[in-house]
Image: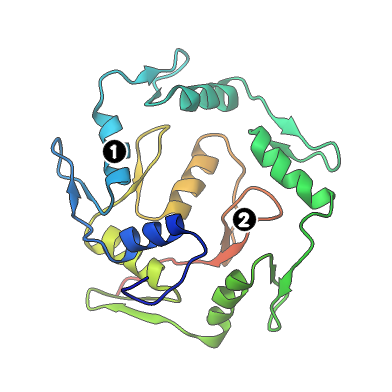
């Protein structure tokens, strides 16, 4: 990245980083309401919520912008269809989630990076490095609006946009509720729309199987 020297393995990741971290958060404005977004992709996703030809569920009041979302909603919420692992009986609402979980039984995901200060381990070195910042007490100061601080610049940026500027880029396609953090959207979908519950702990899981990584809890402490 020519603005912060951070490097990425693929161009898509670099583009996503630049849009999230360096673009004007109000560059793309909706002409139908007061919302604004830092990327054209997020604006397009938002504009779908204004369309009149949304697909309605015939069993409840939910509606969707895409057919596959409607089918997934009906399968999970109204039909209760689950895919069961034949090794440990864990269940998943999507076949892709089950396939990812099955890799843990086949020994394809074996490399772990353990933390030398606690019992946690990670499948990627970068996630271990991020986790160790918590033990080292490394945080980035937030701003004058509150006393919150974060171990990642991306989390700080999201906090400032969502909490202090009211920009929430992540929309639930099941009920149109918006969130400033993607992990909050995932938690909402899993808890509200038929998914697996999250543990009440200092850390929140980002996924639904054993390969998911832990990230620090970023609960905001108000002054």
Q: In which quarter of the image is residue 145?
A: bottom left
Residue at mark 1: 44
148 shown above or below 12: below
Residue drawn at (51%, 34%) of the image: 193
Label 2 neighbour load within 10 Å: few <14, some 14-19, many 20+: few
18 vs 118, left or right, is: left
The picture places residue 58, in percent across and down from the top left corner, at: 45, 12
Question: Could you give the CA–CA distance between mark 1 and mark 2, rounded to whole angstroms?
Answer: 34 Å
174 shown above or below 18: above
The picture places residue 1, in percent across and down from the top left corner, at: 37, 70
196 vs 65, left or right, is: right
CB under 8 Å between callouts 1 and 2? no
Residue at mark 2: 199
Residue drawn at (71%, 39%) of the image: 98
Please identify the residue farthest to the bottom as the structure is shown.
Answer: 136
119 shown above or below 72: below
SS of the residue under disc 2: loop
- Mark nearer the viewer, 1 or 2: 1
Q: Quadrant of residue 56?
A: top left
Q: Nearer the viewer, residue 28 or 191?
A: 28
The picture places residue 150, in percent across and down from the top left corner, at: 41, 75
């Amino acid at each position: 990245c020519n603005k912060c020297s951070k490097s990425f393995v693929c161009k898509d990741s670099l583009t996503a980083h630049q849009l999230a971290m360096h673009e004007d958060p109000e560059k793309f404005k909706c002409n139908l309401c007061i919302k604004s977004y830092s990327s054209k992709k997020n604006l397009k996703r938002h504009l779908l919520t204004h369309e009149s030809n949304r697909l309605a569920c015939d069993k409840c009041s939910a509606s969707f912008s895409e057919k596959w979302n409607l089918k997934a909603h009906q399968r999970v919420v109204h039909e209760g269809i689950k895919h069961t692992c034949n090794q440990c009986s864990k269940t998943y609402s999507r076949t892709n989630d089950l396939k990812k979980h099955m890799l843990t039984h086949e020994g394809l995901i074996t490399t772990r990076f353990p933390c030398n200060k606690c019992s946690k381990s990670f499948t990627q070195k970068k996630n271990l490095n991020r986790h160790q910042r918590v033990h080292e007490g490394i945080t980035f100061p937030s701003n004058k609006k509150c006393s919150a601080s974060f171990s990642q610049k991306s989390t700080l940026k999201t906090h400032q946009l969502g909490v202090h500027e009211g920009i929430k880029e992540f929309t639930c396609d099941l009920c149109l509720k918006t969130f400033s953090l993607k992990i909050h959207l995932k938690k909402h979908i899993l808890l509200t729309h038929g998914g697996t519950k999250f543990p009440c702990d200092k850390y929140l899981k980002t996924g639904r199987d054993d390969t998911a990584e832990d990230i620090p809890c970023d609960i905001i402490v108000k002054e």
